[in-house]
Image: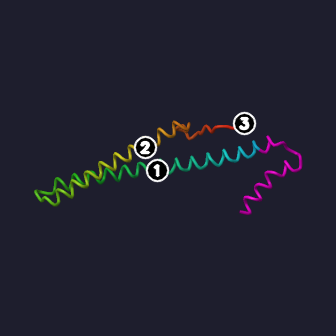
Amino acid sequence: MRKIIYSALTLMAPLMASAATIEDVISTVRGIVDAIIEDVISTIRGIVDAIIPLFMVVAVAVFLWGIIQYITSAGDEEKRKSAQGYIVYGLIGLFVMVAFWGIIKVVSSTFGVQEGGTINLPSISP
């Protein structure tokens, strides 16, 4: 809480000393907020870009494991049902990951986050 109060006082110090106008303070605050938002969005994007391929690999591995179990079940009905479950779970996992990837792409294009990580933030005029 003290850091917030000290930060607010630091930002308002030029205004109190009449060294800056309110527009200068607003532009300074806007620059700080823009930098924080860009950092948060790029961090989230990096995490998502790293996790989705990992989950896709896991889903493919589960699917392939189910196929191998299905082939090697050799007429055992219980093993065959278990293998079918792995196949279904693998396919559902792949579908969910591809759908999630698509949703991320739609949201990023809607909010103007480009492939290079550049973010076009909206601006508010004082």
- Write down the quadrant of residue 101 in the picture: top left
Residue at 17%, 60% in the rendered image: 79
Which secondary structure class fits the magenta region best? helix
Residue 80 is situated, as x and y percent measured from the top left of the image, at 17, 56
Residue 3 is situated, as x and y percent measured from the top left of the image, at 73, 61
* Classed neighbour count for the residue bearing mark 2: other residues with Cα under 10 Å, few (<14), some (14–19), many (≥20): some
Question: Which stretch is magenta?
Answer: 1-25
Q: Secondary structure at mark 2?
A: helix
Q: Amino acid at mark 2?
A: Trp
Residue 73 vertical position relative to residue 34 in the rendered view, above or below: below
Mark carried by residue 125: 3
Closer to the camera: disc 1 or disc 2?
2
Residue at 81%, 51% in the rendered image: 12
* Classed neighbour count for the residue bearing mark 3: other residues with Cα under 10 Å, few (<14), some (14–19), many (≥20): few
* 14 in the magenta segment: yes
Q: How many marks?
A: 3
Instruction: Tell me, yes or no, whether the two marked residues, 1 and 3, touch with CB atoms within 8 Å.
Output: no
Measured in 3D between alpha carbons, the distance from the residue under mark 3 to the one under mark 2, in whole angstroms, is: 35 Å
Q: Which residue is mark 2?
A: 101
In the rendered image, which quarter contains the N terminus? bottom right
Q: Earlier in the sequence, mark 1 or mark 3?
A: 1
